[in-house]
Amino acid sequence: MKIKELLNRNKVNFSCEIFPPKKDTDFSEVFDVVDRIGELGADYISVTYGAGGSTSKKTVEVASYIQNQKQTTALAHLTCIDSTPEQIQAELAELKANGIENIMALRGDKPKDFTGPHNYNYAIELIRDIHASGDFCVGAACYPEGHVECPHKQEDIAHLKEKVDAGVDFLTTQMFFDNNLFYKFLYQTLAAGITVPIVPGIMPIINARQVKRSAELSGATMPARFLAIADKFSGDPLSMEQAGIAYATDQIIDLIANGVKYIHLYTMNRPSTAEKILNNLSHIIR
Ligand code: FAD
């Protein structure tokens, strides 16, 4: 099913993100993750795409397992920054051959030794190629606090509007820890004429390593309440896990209470985290 149709239903849509295995021998572990997330009743499962294309075949294989073995809607991520148009055409043909109709179209992070320009410099170029190649439902990324490379948030939103106008059916946000930043972003995007569904991406932070890495990778603001939790509990793994799950649960309850109809969990291949959060929301989400 196309995700734009799922998001159009009158219910809270719940989805999870996983990443493909690093080694060929680890597929069964990832398939187990998919099985457990499938049992939670996720409306769709997204599969990330490794930089450099090294795991690209693995993304398709995991997405195909979700779509064809589990009969759950799969969203395959695809990046373009270090691909040629011929490689992208081959990827699209493979997705089509596997019955995958939803693609998260991304530029990918610039490699460290980037001198540019590349065949693809922005996600919008990939989105145009995807639409020229078939009847795919296309998602794209957005950044409530602005993308790190763009110095001015209004300019970032103007680029986002161009990207959506090129044929984006829904957006998924970068992680955020302060819902007010997301609500402000919703107003800003609406004012810019962006009307496609915007799915908030929630990252449960359940260990000390994640606290540091998430701030570094995403540039997301860590509110005082979150920092106090990390400060108090990050030395005690079980307490940090419990507090991180409670924080993510609170964020989701607040989003739904404010009328948000979509929740995307960055599950990081830990189905038990998703299970615990969903247990906390058993009446709220279903
Ligand atoms: P773009 O939309 O191309 O934007 C990149 C930057 O270029 C922005 O600063 C934008 O303002 C600017 N820009 C856009 N158009 C123009 C223009 N015409 N002129 C000048 N500047 C412009 N990475 C992976 O490698 N694999 C994944 O699976 C993956 N999944 C992700 C999922 C989500 C939900 C999110 C939020 C991010 C994900 N990423 C992933 C990270 C993403 O690849 C990076 O954030 C990347 O740096 C930007 O990708 P983009 O598609 O948002 O780029």
Image: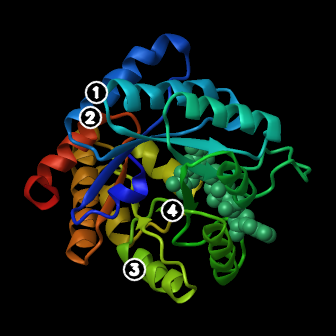
Residue 67: x percent and y percent? 39, 32
According to the image, label 2 marks what residue? 38
180 w.r.t. 91: above or below: below
What residue sits right under mark 3 in the picture?
Answer: 183
The answer to whether the residues at label 4 and label 2 have Cβ atoms under 8 Å apart is no
Tell which of 42 and 101 is nearer to you.
Answer: 101
Q: Residue at x 52, y 48 (%)?
A: 213
The residue positioned 10% from the left and 52% from the top of the image is 282
The front one of 144 and 132 is 132
Counting residues from the start of the chain, the first of labels 3 and 1 encountered is 1
Q: For residue 149, say whether it is visible.
A: no
Residue that badge 4 annotates: 169
User: Where is ligand 1, by quadrant?
Assistant: bottom right
Is label 2 in contact with label 1 (beta carbons under 8 Å)?
yes
Three-letter amino acid code of the residue under disc 1 = Asp
For label 3, count other residues whose C-alpha is less than 10 Å away and answer few (under 14), some (14-19) or many (20+). Answer: some
At label 3, which amino acid type do we have? Tyr
Q: Which mark's residue is nearer the viewer, 4 or 3?
A: 4
**Relative depth, front residue between 37 and 124:** 124
In percent of width and height, residue 258 lies at 25, 78
Judging by the rendered image, the residue that carries numbered circle 1 is 35
Report if the CB atoms under discs 3 and 1 are less than 8 Å apart: no
